Image: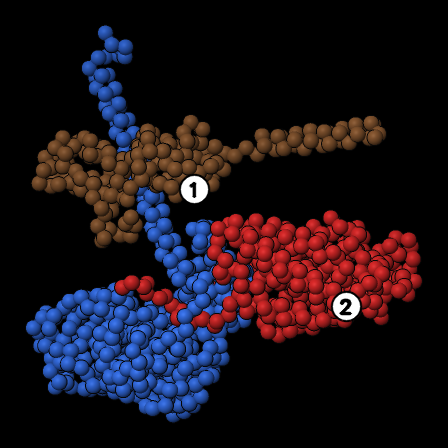
Amino acid sequence: MNASAILAAIGTVAALAAVLGGILGWVATRLRSDPDALVERIDALLPQTQCAQCRYPGCRPYAEAIARGEADIDRCPPGGEATVRALAALLDREPRPVDPHYGTTRAPRVALIDEDRCIGCALCLPACPVDAIVGAPRLMHTVIAAQCTGCELCLAPCPVDCIAMVEPAATSPGRAVA
Amino acid sequence: MKLRGLTLDGHKSRPLKGLIRPVPPPAMLVLALDQGAGEAAAPVVRPGDAVRVGSPIAAGAGAATALHSPVSGIVREIAEHPAPRGAGRCIVIDNDGRDEPAVPAAPVDWRAMDGKALLGLVAEAGIAGLGGAAFPTATKLALARAAGVDLLLLNGAECEPWICCDDALMRERAPDIVLGAQVMLAATGAQRCVIAIEDDKPEAIAAVESAVRATDDARFEVRVLPALFPLGAEAPLVAAVTGREVPHDGWPPQVGAVCQNVATAATVARLVRDGRPAMSRIVTVTGSGVNEPANVEARIGTPVAALVDACGGYAATNVRHIAGGSLTGRMLVGDEVPVTKGLNCVLLATAADLPLRAPEVPCIRCGDCADVCPAGLLPQQLHVAARAGDSAGLARFGLDACIECGCCDYVCPSSIPLTARFRAARAREHLAEVERHRALEAKARYERHQRRLAEQAEAERQAFDAARRRAGGADPGGG
Amino acid sequence: MTAPIPQPPHVVAGFTVPRVMFQVLAALLPVLAVQVYLFGPRPLLLVAVAAVAALACEALALRLRRRSMQPFLRDGSVLVTAALLALAVPPTLPPGHLVLGVACAVLLAKHAYGGLGQNPFNPAMVGYAVLLVSFPLEMTRWPAPGDGWDAMTGATALDALRTGLRQSYTMQEIMAGPAFGRVGAAGGEWINLAALAGGLYLLARGLVRWHIPVAVLAGIAGPAALFHTFDPGAHASASFHLASGATMLGAFFIATDPVSAATSDRGRLVYGAGIGLLTWVIRSWGGYPDGVAFAVLIMNLAVPLIDRCTVPRIHGHVR
């Protein structure tokens, strides 16, 4: 076999690889995607429950953590499998089940204040991340069911434990029941 | 524009051999509060009230039309009862057999009324679209008037196999249709009227043409269309008659036309002739499961069993009851279901009428479905997207433009239940869309909540600084 | 209620996959008849061997994939693959080689991708391509027509065309050679005519729509006519191309395989034209005498892109 021919072939392919690889690398640095846009796209896939089960104080901080590479995509129980798959498709990763360490996926529920037991302490009002509880100190509190995301953050502050999580009523507009 | 669809065997000849038969009102009538449009009317009577022919028993709102009692008698109860679109609340009336009218029959001087007054008259009479959708006619005409339509398109196509009630109506009561159309023209302000009839109905065409000639009204035209299923659906019909396409997320008034079924026009005619509200309709009773297939005129609320009795009774056991035709009809649970404004045909089918389909095998991408789809879709691609739950794919291939006519199912060599899959996919997509909307709202409220807290914190900090300045003088470091 | 309520539509036309497949087989009978007339009983043997091998491979694959044998074994799709392959290869091919080709077609091209309706490549052409590159000599030697079983095999017309042009003979000189008939290849003309007859039958029965065959034939005939007009000595005429090789078989039976073809009518025109054009290019300048197999496989690669670009406008949508 002709040694110089072999060397020529190897050299050509190596040179091609170097040139093409260099071009690809340069293009990757020049066309880097806008990180803010990525956070927006991740946030758009999350269910906006603002429940903090992922250990971040809201969906937007979790989206930012995913974009930074800090958090994995399997931390959202309210989003369930559908959200994990959508995030996996967006970020080109492997989908996997929701990590049970962060909670289990359940049918959507809304908070209901038992008005007989409510003492009007107003401690649950600031706890709601979407301001779905109306009321004032020493006046009756109530949850606006259509705006409740089921995050359960109001349960802990209540001193008389008068808030329960119930299935959304059939008259609640368009809620997918289970 | 290419008209796509199927040329099907009509099975319409047997019921049309005789004239329209009247069905004597039964001892008990069941009037569904939801007459087919999806919303229920609100009852204005209570159990024990006496009613007469034509007295109002329910008030219309939204998609529900007003209901009037078709007989005189006593209201027995308001309870759940099977109905063509599923069980619902119904007003049950015991017929006393005397047929006493609430007000005597009297013609209405409709030519002296303006458009708005005519619309009010039609609304009070509870007239609904009799082509199957049962949408309130007055609402549809009012919206058409507001949109400034110039064409009233009367739908006499009746393209689906087995159904022939409109054919019988056109043969026997063509003058009513023309009179009703004239009233609708006055109500909407439209300039002309086209009555579209398929070419497999030569007697009907002749009857309607002679009625049009008799009125000597230059605004009318009879258009003959090829007998193609589903040319009777609104969007293909408007496209065939006017050449304009209705936008997929819009409706015919956007291209200057409003569609009405010929039976609806005939009901309007009866309203202005006798002052009678909508209380009866013509129903085709057909299929191998009934002895004498016929078109019958029955009062709203008559159970299907009474219709079958008027047609010689059942011819076989093990009969399926289908409301509508063989392509888009829905199966009924039994013959206690009552006639509603939206029920145009009861098909009593034996196994010979509707042979079973073969078991499903994978799609071989033959493209026969795309060939016959009247909406120009690619059902094979929609099927792939529907199975994968691919929302983007379903939107791209136009799931929202599917009219669920069943043509693709009909021709599929792999026996795939495409229509059922698309209907299920539509429901899932609708729920997903609602959830997306909720999530967006929650996100907006969350962001408002965060802003509110930030503003509060800022206001507190400023108040604290101002108080400290007032208290401590110029030294910010304290002391 | 034990059974679910049936959903509309309540009637169907009654078309089934086996009916489609067996009508295609019927349309192939003229081609088989002509081959038997020209070459003796050997094509019958090959078709029989291919059919048995195909059914055996299908059964094996269904067993390995743990699917039920019914209704797939009876739907006739694998028989169409076998028949096309058996009719496309020379009758002198040893049956053992043909079995290898059928096995590749059924096991690799069809079942490895998911079975009926899932193959991205035309299975018969995959089998043909495997045979062509594995046994180039046996696959390009066709017997002279009329000599029967023990015919001495020689070059086909397309083969003679290619070598003749390389050696700078003109078209007139080449076409005077023994492998040529009046218009095209000596026996090939009749085979193409039989395939055309079968194809017209399929068109008349509505089993095949006109877009792919017309586009394939136009894709071959168009450039051929153009180049033949400008340089008759160096390029064969359109009628030669249409009457030689697997042109008609390819246009009506091979390219029209619905699973691996494009989806919409516009897409099918593009797909067919691409096959025709590539066939002509490979025949004129490529390394193989007949280009249909590779043209089809290359266009199969392009189908997803074609589908993306040719979605038809939906009624009521503006685009």
Residue C204 in picture, x, y percent from top left: 62, 74
Q: Is residue C298 left or right of residue B187?
A: right
Q: Which residue is located at x 62 percent, y 30 percent? A: A26
Up the image or down, B378 lies above or below C104; here it is: below
State which chain is coloured red.
Answer: C
Q: Nearer the viewer, residue C273 or C299?
A: C299
Q: Amino acid at mark 2?
A: Gly
Q: Which residue is located at x 32 percent, y 63 percent? A: C4
* SS of the residue under disc 1: helix
To the question of a shared chain for discs 1 and 2, the answer is no
Up the image or down, B350 lies above or below A20; here it is: below
Q: Which residue is located at x 76 percent, y 28 percent? A: A11
Q: Nearer the viewer, residue B415 or A102?
A: B415
Residue with the mark numbered 1: A86
Q: Amino acid at mark 1?
A: Ala
Neighbour tally class for label 1: few under 14, some 14-19, many 20 plus, Cα within 10 Å? some
State which chain is coloured blue.
Answer: B
Residue C179 in picture, x, y percent from top left: 86, 64
Neighbour tally class for label 2: few under 14, some 14-19, many 20 plus, Cα within 10 Å? some
State which chain is coloured brown.
Answer: A
Q: CA distance from mark 1 to mark 2?
A: 61 Å
* SS of the residue under disc 2: loop
Toward which corner of the image does residue C150 lie, by quadrant? bottom right
Residue A55 in picture, x, y percent from top left: 32, 29
Q: Is residue B77 left or right of residue C4?
A: left
Subunit of label 2: C
> Which dot, 1 or 2, sits closer to the camera?
2
Q: Residue furthest top?
A: B479
Subunit of label 1: A
Residue with the mark numbered 2: C40
